[in-house]
Image (cartoon, rainbow, N blue to C red):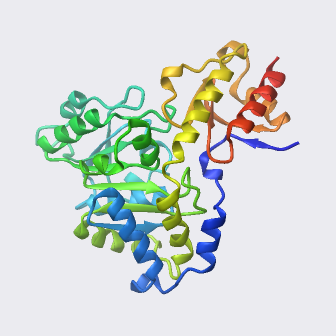
Amino acid sequence: MEVLNFRSDTQTLPTEEMLDAIRYAQLGDDVYGEDPTVARLEALAAEKMGMEAALLVASGTMGNLVSLMTHASGPGEALLVDPSSHIFRNEGGGLASIAGYFPIPISSRHGKLDPDEVAASVYEPDIHYPTPHLLCLENSHNRSGGRVTPLDLHKKLCSTARQHGLAIHLDGARIFNAAVAAGVGVSEYAAEVDSIQFCLSKGLSCPVGSMIAGSAEFIEKARFHRKRIGGGMRQAGVIAAAGIVALETMIDRLRDDHANARLLAEGLNTIPGLNVPMDAVETNIINVDHTGTGLSTQAVISKLNEVGVIVSPRAPTAIRMVTCRHTGEPEVTEALARIKQALQ
């Protein structure tokens, strides 16, 4: 029985074109700035974002951490962050333990922050409180089910942050998904922020790697912090080669993943005990409420494992399913049949 993996889009394997590019990549020592393939990827990433420069890092978590370290002027500064964001929940507490930030949580609604709450969370200078210096955003928003912050709201959030003297970092691990769903250029989101991180290894199908983009000065400082935490890589062109192919060929096809997520959600809603609000399906991630089955999340996962469908836990009454280029319409159709069988 073929295993159908809907756990995450991190499962994506490199395309044949990527493998060929890796095989024939020109290489050099990137710690010394001598890898021409890395240089080409960084220039391409900066161009895509409409920013001055970019930097290759090993992972999205590293990209976010390096960005926060670069923004910080010393330990104990505060940042505004959604407590359901990846930076806050899923990155080992690095924002505090390594970057030295005190987090001030601002809860989102469906993955979207409120500009008024951002403004209200910026304390007046007072010796009793840490002063916020940075606003962290996430788009698309993982835990909310891949929800997208529209460009107009993004601009309002960033404008509010600027009015209160805050720098802005965007965790754009899936920013290309967000931009495709919103029907705008990714550079329109990037234009409003000081730094952005995006992943190559999710829907874009690279085996590894993420990018940071920002001003030339910011990226030069980020390069130092990347080295400080052990992120300098030697012949990193073997990573960068796949990234170039991804940015040149894999962005537009993300809309296929979004369409397949909607197809999956529609089918799940026909299975007794499962519920997916269709207005919440904006990109390639869906949160599936299974309250009606009377089963725990782990019990649902176990039953689906038995029929070869892999998913991940989201909440005590919800699982997460993610589409990617390996889970197209045939795989969605087969998964729905198996899930119905497992839960009947």
275 vs 323, nearest the viewer: 323
**Which percent across, then down, holds residue 278?**
53, 21
Pick out the residue farthest to the right.
Answer: 1
Residue 279, relative to residue 19: is it above or below?
A: above
Q: Residue at x 54, y 19 (%)?
A: 277
- Give the position of the N terminus as an image quadrant: top right
Q: Residue at x 65, y 16 (%)?
A: 291
- Is residue 316 something one can see in this rendering? no
**Which percent across, then down, holds residue 297?**
69, 27
Q: Residue at x 62, y 40 (%)?
A: 323
- Is residue 161 something one can see in this rendering? yes
Q: Residue at x 33, y 68 (%)?
A: 222
**Which percent across, then down, holds residue 152?**
26, 34
**Which percent across, then down, holds residue 331?**
74, 38
Residue 73, relative to residue 236: is it above or below?
A: above
Residue 305 horizontal side relative to residue 158, left or right: right
127 vs 9, nearest the viewer: 9
